[in-house]
Image (spheres, rainbow, N blue to C red):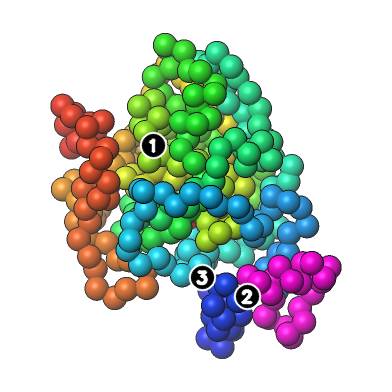
Amino acid sequence: MRKFGDLTEADITPKSVYLNRRQILRAMGLAGVAIAGGKVFSRFAFPPAAVQAGTKLDVSIKSPYSTTEKINTFEDVTHYNNFYEFGTDKSDPAKNAQKFRTVPWTVSVEGEVKKPAKYSMDDILKLAPLEERIYRHRCVEGWSIVVPWIGYSLNTILKLAEPTEKAKFVAFQSYYDRGQMPWAEHSGIELPYVEGLRIDEAMHPLTLLCVGMYGESLPNQDGAPVRMVIPWKYGFKSIKSIVKIRCVKGMPPTTWNMYAPNEYGFYSNVNPNVDHPRWSQATERRLGEFLRRKTLMFNGYDQVASLYTGMDLRKNY
Ligand SMILES: Nc1nc2c(c(=O)[nH]1)N[C@H]1C(S)=C(S)[C@@H](COP(=O)(O)O)O[C@H]1N2
Ligand SMILES: [Mo]
């Protein structure tokens, strides 16, 4: 936890201003040098390579899927994270993920597809125009945030791979390296982190392959260099630091379901009417707010309701 008085520049300077300063510093070749004394710049790992965390991205489209709700601060979204590979406390990833090496990076698209492929991050950044999507994001634990993510629909990359008739689900896998992630041993969950979607969920345009936020590439603690964001599902479905996307015939295993199957189902759609066995899901606390607000069915993303017609969402939690 940061101590009181441990002010960073982000606390006192609007994002646009300190971003510009970072860019200027980078251009001057002063990367990583704290010129304003002690703490101020030390939090930023000035990235030397093109697609490392904190690189400005060229965003050409504002998405019609964006909410107009108030966006959370960059500070909130980068200092209250679940990323068990880097520790289980919400403040751990911001500290422990800073040295995580995300260059070079490869994502493999494989399995029940006609055209399996391996993509570098440069490939991924060029596959489609980058969109900004301001999504609500609801964690199963009861907090929520609003984030201006950057990316494009996962279906872009899936269509290129041409899933076969047999592809009924998509399985995702996170990067895992004990050496870089020594905290993982004490996380209690089995790693690498794995997640899955039904193929129609994966193809839905709301399902975002995410490469950035707040105008720049993803900070390490938010899942650099590429993650999923599935806004109508609880946060844990939005798997970080992806290395593998595999089309498969059967429902794939998922990390939290393996950990506690009665608590975390495969679908994990945000649903205020179905309680978690240990707590209610009816309300949530938006980071930065005091009063709790009502949680909406599918986190307010009603356009996905038709994916589940005829399903008992109490059974398929
Ligand atoms: N690889 C990996 N992905 C992960 C997690 C994790 O521990 N490891 N935590 C999940 C959970 S529980 C949530 S709420 C979101 C949090 O994303 P954020 O830190 O960017 O808000 O990431 C999800 N993706
Ligand atoms: Mo979560």
Label placed on residue 75: 3
Magenta span: predominant SS is loop
Marks 1 & 3, CB-CB < 8 Å contact: no
Sequence-earlier tag: 2 or 3: 2
Task: Say which residue label 1 marks.
Answer: 205
Instruction: Tell me: is circle 3 under 8 Å from ligand 1.
Output: no
Q: Which of marks 1 and 3 is in front?
A: 1
Q: Which residue is drawn at 71% across and 64% down?
A: 45
How far, Cα to Cα, is label 2 from label 1? 33 Å
> How far apart are the two marked residues, 2 and 3, measured between alpha carbons?
12 Å
Q: Mark 2 points at which residue?
A: 18
- Crowding at dot 1, Cα within 10 Å, few <14 / some 14-19 / many 20+, comes out as some
Badge 3 marks a residue whose secondary structure is helix
- Which stretch did the figure color magenta? 19-41
Question: Residue type at mark 1?
Answer: Pro
**Closer-to-camera residue (9/28):** 28
Q: Which of 228 and 206 is in front in this view?
A: 206
Give the mark nearest the N terminus, 1 or 3. 3
Asked if disc 2 and disc 3 are in contact, CB closer than 8 Å, the reply is no
Ligand 1 within 8 A of label 1's CB?
Answer: no
Mark 2 or 1, nearer chain start: 2
Amino acid, disc 2: Tyr
Image location (x, y in percent) of residue 167 = 43, 17
Residue 120, above or below 63: above
- Residue 289 horizontal side relative to residue 210, left or right: left
Residue 28 disc label: none
Q: Which of 48 and 126 is in front in this view?
A: 126
Q: Is residue 103 above or below residue 290?
A: above
